[in-house]
Image: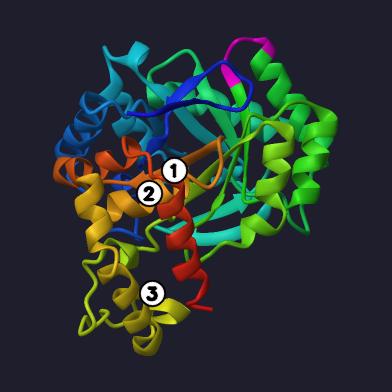
Amino acid sequence: MIFREIGNSGIRASVLALGTWAIGGDAAWGKQDDDISIRAIHAALEKGINLVDTAPAYGLGHSERVVGKAIRGKRDRVILSTKCGLVWGDNEGSQFLVRDGAVIRRNLSKKAILAGAEESLRNLGTDYIDIFITHWQSAPPFITPISETMEALLQLKKEGKIRAIGVANATCEQVEEYLRCGDVALVQQKYSMLDRNVEEGLLPLCEEKGITLQAYSPLEQGLLTGRIGRDYVLPEGDIRSKTRWYQPQHRNRILSMLEGWEPLCKKYHCNLSNLVVAWTAAQGQKINVLVGSRKAEHVLENFRGGEVTLEREDVLRMRGEIENLG
């Protein structure tokens, strides 16, 4: 497994991180078997994946509690990241979404962050969080100045309750404002071969400041695994039906590209998912790749992506073919 420092925090984490949104078992994913989820986390640790990412909003705390059970007695082997800024149970904050009977709101006030940190520590059964991430940035009508948000995060860091600060789903301007108020070790943002918007500003900014960019959705909801065939029919109401790349005319071009990479999979002794993860990690020295897994067999399929180092000529070849998709 390849390891990289998270920002300039001194925290060394596996380049492949385990995402645990699905194991929260909320309406977005359906009910999950907690025992199976725990086995998946244990399988990740056994394969050298030490960074586990969760959030209170994943199943209204359920994902955190499952992660907490899984790492009991193994805390020293885990780099644990969770988030703050999405709350429910009161009317303070800007409405974000309604799920499982709860109105979830954006709230990055100092009061909400400090309370959220304590709740996460209880859910996770630990006395510290390695990376504490602002999940979504504040929005009208409930705007919190980033200076107030950072004040809370720095207080938690001073108290030893968190080790490093992260920011998710933020613009370059917001990241720069966080940096004016304190330190940031990690920026979490959507990044895949098919969605390279971060390359326009956020990735260069992170490289300049020595910040880790953690890429989520690198496999584009399964499309880049090669398991979604030309004749695959999306279930009615599936959110992927609104995605450009899942439209048949675009999907066929992507699948043709992936089929052309089979010799690369043989060269690196990996599957397509591994190759895609390795390519994503190769786009910078500070990139971390977040992949969700609900079952141990999924972990066993994915972990090799964190071990593969692609030769530069192969990285460039793949980029050329990706850019030709338009």
Q: Nearer the viewer, residue 85 or 181?
A: 181
Residue that numbered label 2 is attached to:
277
Residue 321 is situated, as x and y percent measured from the top left of the image, at: 45, 70
Q: Residues within 10 Å of mark 3 (few under 14, many from 20)?
A: some
Element type at mark 2: helix
Q: Residue at x 39, y 85 (%)?
A: 247
Q: How many marks?
A: 3
Q: Is residue 10 above or below residue 249?
A: above
Indicate the amino acid at tag 1: Val
Give residue 289's mark: 1
- The magenta stretch is 158-163
* Quarter of the view holding residue 69: top left
Residue that numbered label 3 is attached to:
240
Indicate the amino acid at tag 2: Val
* Quarter of the view holding residue 149: top right
| Camera-nearest label, 3 or 2 | 2
Q: Is residue 108 above or below residue 130?
A: below
Q: Earlier in the sequence, mark 1 or mark 2?
A: 2
